[in-house]
Amino acid sequence: MSAAQPSATVVKQAIQWMLRLRESGPDQRLQRKCEQWREAHPEHERAWQRVLSLHQDLDLRAIPGAGLALHTLETSERRLHRRQALKLLGGAALIGSASWLSKDLQLLTDWRADYSTGTGERRSVTLPDGSLLQLNTRSAADLAFDARQRLIRLNHGELMLTCSDAQANGRPLLVQTRDALLEGVNGRFTVRQRDDCTQVSVSAGQVALHGPGPSALHWLGSGQHWSIDAHGPRVVEQPDMDAAAWADGLIVTGNMRLADFVAEVARYRPGFLSCSDDVADLRLSGVYRLADTDALLELLPQTLPVRLHQRTRWWVRLERAA
């Protein structure tokens, strides 16, 4: 990592300042104190800019319990170490909305990755060897290119890799996840790191899946879809979603459960999105554009017996229509 990157401790301090300012409103005294902290050291300003770039996705004020925690953070400053106060904030918000918080706070760790994306963001990077790396929403990856290999570590999320020269100077082009080590031979493939497995879909060419042992090598061919977990790899015969469509800003489904579709859309928007159990098994097929997820959700009642229950823009639930 570059020496210019701020430390985790300083980043936490920047987060605390952001939370105080957002909760207090136009408090000039507090703003001056924040400015003094930022000016005290160049590392403080770098951390502030990092956190500021994430503030639109990290809307903690709307999370149940966050208001009380922010108040505690202010009034407890004399009694609690800053790290303890920040833990208090996380605990209160976690009680209010565990899934939402864990989804959004992942952004705070991505600043250390070589490449990362925020909510609803896609990013394309031409690698030093000419290969094209594309990251989907909420994804993070690190590069380790040296004289022996070209390695991409997918920390979380999803990538698409279009290979340029699969064996440049004898260096294999590798993608590593928690469950798999993949070698791009040629063509294009997508890799998604889920909580319980790694999913691989090959759009063109071939991919070699390396496993433990001298004979544990699987060839993944064009048009194939695989799932890899602790029990090994298996072919997915009929996926309910086009694994590569996100690169074109689309979700393309085929007889997909509504609950799975909602979980997929939730990856591309901040806040809380769910559906009730009595509509979870409804099925849908179609092409949906990701550019405006609000408009996307408004399409669903036109084809399914559901309605949108919306408390705020950041809290939406699909329920059975009356």
Image (tube, rainbow, N blue to C red):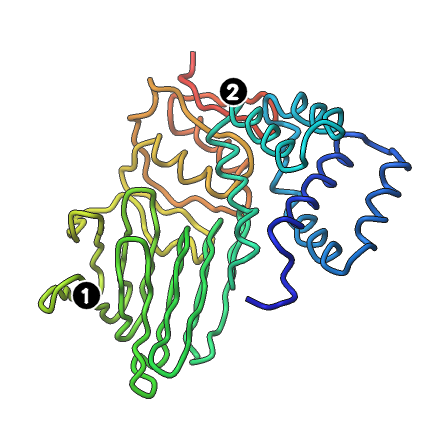
How many residues crowd around disc 2 within 10 Å: few (fewer than 14), some, or many (20 or more)? some
Disc 2 and disc 1: Cα gap in Å?
Answer: 43 Å
Q: In the rendered view, does 136 fall on the left or right side of 84?
A: left
Assign a secondary structure to mark 1. strand
The residue where tag 2 is placed is 309
Q: Is residue 276 left or right of residue 92?
A: left
Q: Between disc 2 and disc 1, whose residue precedes?
A: 1
How many marks the image carries: the answer is: 2
- Amino acid type, callout 1: Gly
Vertical position of residue 45 compared to residue 126: above or below: above
Q: Nearer the viewer, residue 190 or 58?
A: 58
Name the front one of labels 2 and 1. 1
Q: Locate residue 216 relative to residue 186 in the image: left or right.
A: left
Where 219 falls versus 263 (above or below)?
below
Dot 1 corresponds to which residue? Answer: 221
Residue, x 27% and y 47% (percent of image)? Answer: 197
Q: Residue at x 67, y 34 (%)?
A: 81
Q: Is residue 187 above or below residue 315?
A: below
